[in-house]
Amino acid sequence: MVNRPFQRLAKAVTNAYADDVPATAEAAEAVQRGLALKAQSVLRMAVIVGVFAELIVFPPWRNTAASLALAALYGVWTLWIAVWAWTDRLTIRPVVLVFGDLVALSSLLLVTGELSEPIWYATLIDDAFLFISVMAAFQFEPKATLTVAFTAAALYIGCVGFGESQGQNPYWRATLMQGLYTLVLGLGCALLSAVQGRRVRMIQGLLSHQAWLLDRVMTAEERERNELAEALHDGALQTVYASLLLIERAARAQPHPLLDEADDLLCQVSAQLRNSVTALHSEVLRTQGLDAALQAAADKSASAGGFRVRVDCATPTAGTTMDKLLYRSVTELLSNVVKHARARHVDVTLRAAGKDGWVRLEVADDGVGLSPETVREKQTAGHIGLSSQRHRIEGAGGSFSIRDNTPSGTVVTIEVPVSDD
């Protein structure tokens, strides 16, 4: 029972880290910097809590008020850094903040005075210098971590030496051992930083390769769609046109109700083939851009489904790969609305997302809705349209979500990264 609050705290921290998943190689570095700042803020707050506890339970023999005031300033600075780090508004390099910790801890050593003595309860501020190397290791820069470790050891020994000049007579053997421990821990943190940094660079390489593969897949898919559209247009559709001409000639020579029926059916087949050719090969997307293509696809679906549609394309995307992906997503989602939603109104919105370099696409309808059970039933029955959409979007490094609309209907939200490549 006692451990449950700590388990909840650990789960909350883990979930906060799990939400930051880079989608591109460029985003990986920014995500890593944000995670380093958050991790540092957690450890820094633990250090300041321990420092306050030591100063209150075992107050220094002199300068008590000054020590508490300095620790309070350090605590305010720590809280400010934590708030800015966890709201992703802090863009400074993590190593810069670590030197701020060194200044604060060195000042505390000089003010309290007796903390260089090797007594069991007067060690936390001394030992806090050990945590500085751990804070520096989160940024995955081994050289910077070693620099911080050497600086921490030098400052600690220097502060103790200054205390000796003031007649405090510190225990030099304990002081030198503490400095050695700081260097050894710093070396270990630097090695860990190097290993983790290599892992991050490998992830960046994989993300770059994923983007390259996505571009090739989308190009191959578009080429196959174009070839299929041309085959339908030059093959099946021309055969249907020829059959219509023959039926018309036969009907003029000898009218018959069955000929009229066949003519109507072939006209329907011709319309279906034309729609398929247009869906497979969107000339509007290539010549007029994504916003015009989305409007054309929405108007066509509205005509087929008998609903009103509004398209709000407020932001352009960068890169034809994502344009094609978003266009295909909209056409397939609108096709689902036509077939299943029984909607009266549909909104298609494309805007910049909350993250730099991302766009958010929403297709919202006021139809009958789509529950998770319905999605599973459709997948079991072999309808994998939504599943394939999700896999395609997530394969591009984006996210795909479905939720209920208010007061009725469904909202599908897609977020993908775009780049200038």
Image (tube, helix red, strand yellow):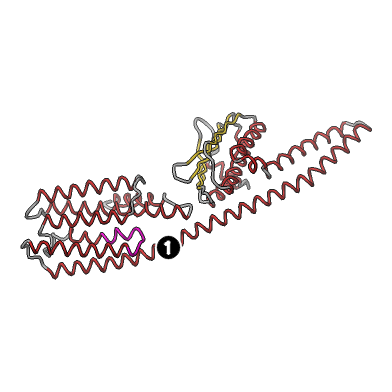
Tell me residue 175's x, y (percent): 15, 67
Residue 300 position within the rendered picture, expressed as x and y whole percent measured from the top left: 66, 34
Q: On the picture, is 354 further left or further right than 217?
A: left
Eyeballing the image, is 160 above or below 84? below
Q: Determine whether, in the image, residue 297 is placed left or right of residue 256.
A: left
Q: Mark 1 Cα within 10 Å, few/some/many (few <14, many 20+)?
A: few
In this view of the protein, which residue sits in the foreground, 250 or 292? 292
The spot of residue 348 in percent (x, y) is 56, 35
Compared to residue 320, the image places residue 123 above or below, namely below
The span shown in magenta is: 132-143
Left or right, 277 with respect to 162, comes to: right
**Residue at 39% of width from left, 62% of height from top?**
197
Identify the residue at image location x=72%, y=50%: 227
Residue 133 magenta-drawn?
yes
Quadrant of res 374: top right
Which residue is denoted by mark 1 in the rendering?
199
Give, as a three-letter code, the residue at label 1: Arg
* Percent position of residue 21, x then y: 44, 52
Displayed quadrant of residue 100: bottom left
As displayed, is residue 288 above or below residue 195?
above
Specify the principal SS of the magenta part.
helix
